[in-house]
Amino acid sequence: MLKSETDWEGWRRAARALVLTGVEPDAVTWSVGGEPAPLPDADGGFHVPRALVSLASQAIQARDADRFGLLYSLVWRANAGERLLENETDPDLSLVRRMALSVRADAHRMRTNMRFLAVPEDGGTHFLGWYEPRHFVLPANAQLITRRFSDLSLSIVTPDGAAHWDRSSLLFGSGLRHVEDDEALQAWWEAHRGSLLEQATPDVSVPEAESLDEVPRPPDRPALGPVVLHTKPDPALLRSAKDASTCRRCPLYESATQIVFGEGPPDASVMFVGEQPGDQEDTIGRPFVGPAGQIMDRAMEEAVIDRRTIYVTNAVKHFKFTPRGKRRIHQTPEVPEIQACNFWLDVERTHVRPRLLVLMGGSAARAVLGRSVTISRERGRPIRMQDGQAVFITVHPSFLLRVPDAAAKAREYQAFVRDLNAIRALMTAD
């Protein structure tokens, strides 16, 4: 019996005691939230690969009821002498790796997409954030976020629970199942703040998200190019991004919040190019963090592509929109705007030097190929340009958001995943 969904230390203690006393995986039932049964007395120790321990610390955060038993089974087998990490086809290990990849992607989305509401409090400001994660990533992410913003008072609220930081202590308590809007979130906080903080506890078990990210994922198949998770930022790219922030090459800068430059490893072997930033990208300042970016992340997980290994950018770096009440409605950029912004795309291509350019949508294809493209006719196959650059054309993920019929939407999504699998095969080919 574990204390919580992310009781990493509790799971490790139980796994150690059970292995040392010879309790086979099929004889163990794992549960969360009840009174723990006494563990058997166990003396001695055993060894499992460090990489397996790291993989388990990530996969334990997956929203999968079978994960505790699955992880214990892998530990049991490793202790019995199986060289698990060398078996690329083992179905249980493959499943755990997919869980870990999905957890890391969800943790990244949470840090990228979550926006904080500034709430007046005791003569200062408390920052209140809401996020609905796919997995149990709050404890690990909260440790990282509060360390990076240690001088702020903040709370992160999710349906699974809430994390509270008062500039000195990190506490965890109950969350909120659903939030209608910012006003409803603030009203709930103001009504329940006292009891929420009073009942919160400091118990944290899983490592923080950054320490999890430092361990490369042993892929089920060869990785998409070199997996370098902590490459130093390229000074030339940083200077270019700074220069682009004052760009006046076309009128789009006048209404946009900020320029949204590309991001990713400076030596990425593949560069994904979209059309332009959307509403959320324009607000946050990072590419592909809105609804289209979330669909792209999910499809990449299915294709076993780690987004941290690719460079993502847009053909046009400012958000073009039409105001409609409080909403900003996307407008397709025109050819002169695409041509004006080609300068910055060329800068990114020069510094990153990718082996493959993935052109998502008609605007990206026009920016690179210099001509109008019919996506349905040219998608799904590599094209070699006159300068030797390899390109691959596919749909923009926002297209999947616009498909009205559920069955058609599912078909188009699977077609996009197939394109990503083809891209992955191209990058792993000799």
Image: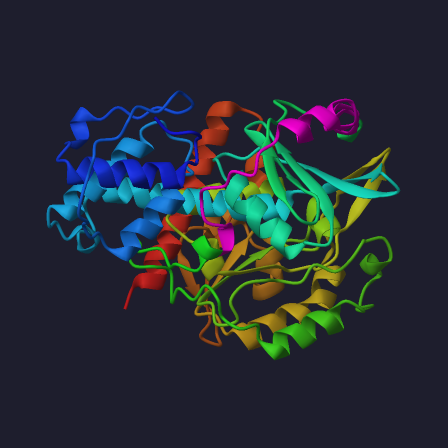
The number of numbered discs placed on residues in the rendered structure image is 0
Give the residue displayed 51% in from the left and 45% down from the top: 140
195 in magenta: yes
Left or right relative to 142: residue 252: right
Q: Is residue 176 visible?
A: yes
Closest to the observer, 170 or 374: 170
Closest to the observer, 335 or 414: 414
Viewport quadrant of the C terminus: bottom left
Note whether 160 is above or below 244 in the view shown: above
Which contiguous range is marked in magenta? 184-210
Viewport quadrant of the N terminus: top left
Closest to the observer, 130 or 383: 130
Give the residue displayed 56% in from the left and 48% down from the top: 143
Left or right relative to 218: residue 294: right
Image quadrant where residue 13 sits: top left
Please tell me whether the stretch drawn in magenta is mainly helix, strand or loop: helix
Give the residue displayed 36% in from the left and 62% down from the top: 427
